[in-house]
């Protein structure tokens, strides 16, 4: 769906059905409508993450229905739940195996800040091991909150300079 404020344009007076756009706008439009999540369901938030894939909430409307359990085929890591110090190196390893560009959503209070757990075994926020782009509050957050976070991430990706990133890589 192309809205009026995007940078894609169509001129019906030009023959051959030509669409004129900037490379950044076209690349980011493709990226925002084909985000493939890597679900890291570590605790109770994972149940809400599973609900988002169901018919009632339908994450497919946002182009993110392809839940990939291989880090090499995904570009959005959704960390859902409590991250322990024992699990932290594996989360980081999976993040490192993801292809660039990659983004992270911290889902729930535990993934965002350690939640109610102030113990020696619990990481106080996944942002200590991976860079987080969007935080979802709640314990556990509703599926609608995850969809809202996905839309916020899509807005962020839409504004990124994609062509410069490709040239510098």
Image: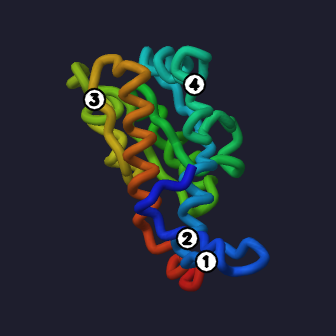
- Residue 104 sits above or below residue 18 on the image: above
| Badge 2 density bin: few <14, some 14–19, many ≥20, Cα 10 Å | some
- Element on which disc 3 rests: loop
Please state which of residues 8 and 82 is positioned toward the viewer in this rendering.
8
Q: Secondary structure at mark 2?
A: strand
Where residue 20 is drawn, which disc sits there?
Answer: 1
Query: Contact, CB < 8 Å: mark 2 with mark 4?
Result: no
Q: Position of residue 112 (x, y in %)?
A: 30, 35
* Colour approach in the figure: rainbow
* Marks 2 & 1, CB-CB < 8 Å contact: yes
Query: What's the CA distance linking mark 2 and mark 3?
Result: 37 Å
Indicate which disc, 1 or 3, sits on the residue closer to the N terminus.
1
Which one is earlier in the sequence, the residue at label 2 or at label 3? 2
Q: Which residue is mark 2?
A: 9
Whole-angstrom CA distance, mark 3 to mark 4, is: 20 Å
The relative height of residue 147 versus residue 98 in the rendered view (above or below) is above
Q: Position of residue 35 (x, y in %)?
A: 59, 47
Q: Toward which corner of the image does residue 29 lie, by quadrant?
A: bottom right
Pointer 4: residues within 10 angstroms few (<14), some, or many (20+)?
Answer: some
Label 4 element class: loop
Q: Which residue is mark 4?
A: 58
Q: Residues within 10 Å of mark 3 (few under 14, many from 20)?
A: many
Q: Is residue 35 left or right of residue 145?
A: right
Single out the residue that lies furthest toward the right: 16
Tell me which residue sits at (49%, 24%) in the image.
42
Give how far apart the Cα atoms at labels 2 and 1 are: 6 Å
Dot 3 or dot 4: first in sequence order is: 4
Q: Which mark is residue 137?
A: 3
Query: How many angstroms separate mark 2 from mark 4 (CA)?
Result: 29 Å
Q: Is residue 129 visible?
A: yes
Residue at image x 59%, y 49%? 33
């Amino acid at each position: 769906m192309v809205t009026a404020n995007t940078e894609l344009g169509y001129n019906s007076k030009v023959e051959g059905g030509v669409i004129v756009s900037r490379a950044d706008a076209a690349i980011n439009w493709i990226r925002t409508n084909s985000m493939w999540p890597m679900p890291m369901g570590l605790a109770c938030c994972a149940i809400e993450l599973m609900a988002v894939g169901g018919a009632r909430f339908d994450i497919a409307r946002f182009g993110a229905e392809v839940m990939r359990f291989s880090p090499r085929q995904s570009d959005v890591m959704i960390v859902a739940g409590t991250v322990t110090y024992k699990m932290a190196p594996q989360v980081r390893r999976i993040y490192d195996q993801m292809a660039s560009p990659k983004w992270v959503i911290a889902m729930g209070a535990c993934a965002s800040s350690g939640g109610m757990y102030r113990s020696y075994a619990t990481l106080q926020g996944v942002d200590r091991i991976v860079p987080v782009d969007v935080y979802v509050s709640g314990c556990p957050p509703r599926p609608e909150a995850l969809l809202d976070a996905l839309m916020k991430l899509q807005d962020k990706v839409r504004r990124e300079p994609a062509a410069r990133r490709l040239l510098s890589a």
